[in-house]
Image (cartoon, rainbow, N blue to C red):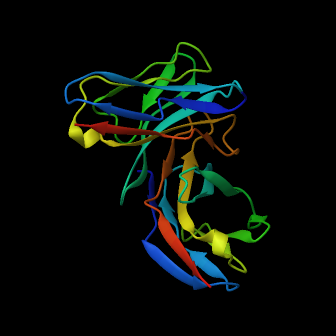
Amino acid sequence: DAGITQSPRYKITETGRQVTLMCHQTWSHSYMFWYRQDLGHGLRLIYYSAAADITDKGEVPDGYVVSRSKTENFPLTLESATRSQTSVYFCASTQARNTEAFFGQGTRLTVV
Amino acid sequence: AQKITQTQPGMFVQEKEAVTLDCTYDTSDQSYGLFWYKQPSSGEMIFLIYQGSYDEQNATEGRYSLNFQKARKSANLVISASQLGDSAMYFCAMREGDTGGFKTIFGAGTRLFVKA
């Protein structure tokens, strides 16, 4: 299916565990983003990427790691999950500076 | 530093009336883009409208218009003839840069309630 897909949609994990959230887009968009959404904070940028093997930190990168070995995939890893990382995570992609970003459905992550 | 501010956590509007959602931004870049997105209760992010920093005219898309005041660094969204389906969270976003990753940040959002 064309579009941008996140998996899993829901995840419960324990404190201290490593967890990876997947993001896959079929448009070959160059630019991809990871956000977390928390009440009162809107969407906060975690990491973004301009192309394969090019990534950069956003507003709240601590505790997260990203990679982008292929244009279409942009996984986000929580190396050692903490309760403060309980959130809804959105992946997005766009082709150019002046075009809208397309968002995945979101992943609701709960860290217990 | 790049910053987006939405000062209205919640807004009420009567059906069929117009409403303005405020957004101010801060950037040192000359080239940037401003976006508005809608997030209904179902959670998906829906693009509404875009304004480039060099665009001389305010952007319009159907019932949505963007009141762009560059000197004041504001990019307010105007929704005309509000409908019940407009009840949602609205986010303002800014994308910087001519090259590189096009860092895009969002404001905290405004929840709009449309009354029948």
Q: Is residue B23 left or right of residue A31?
A: left
Where residue A103 appears, x then y in whole percent? 59, 41
Q: Residue at x 56, y 41 (%)?
A: A105
Q: Residue at x 57, y 47 (%)?
A: B95
User: In which image quadrant can residue B15 be found?
Assistant: bottom right
Where residue B101 appears, x then y in whole percent? 55, 32
Q: Residue at x 63, y 39 (%)?
A: B98
Compared with B58, A60 (above or below) is above
Q: Residue furthest top?
A: A69
User: In which image quadrant can residue B40 be found?
Assistant: bottom right
Compared with B109, A70 (above or below) is above
Q: Is residue A45 left or right of residue B12?
A: left
Numbered-mark total? 0
Where residue B42 appears, x then y in whole percent? 55, 54
Which one is nearer the viewer's eye here, B26 or B18? B18
Which one is nearer the viewer's eye here, A69 or A59? A69
Q: Is residue A99 left or right of residue A11?
A: right
User: In which image quadrant can residue B60 be found?
Assistant: bottom right
Where residue A49 appears, x then y in whole percent? 53, 28
Could you tell me if residue B67 is visible in this image?
no
Which one is nearer the viewer's eye here, B8 or B56? B8
Q: Is residue A22 left or right of residue A51?
A: left
Q: Residue at x 61, y 66 (%)?
A: B70
Q: Residue furthest left?
A: A16
Compared with B115, B4 (above or below) is above
Could you tell me if residue B110 is visible in this image?
yes
Q: Quadrant of the C terminus of chain B?
A: bottom right
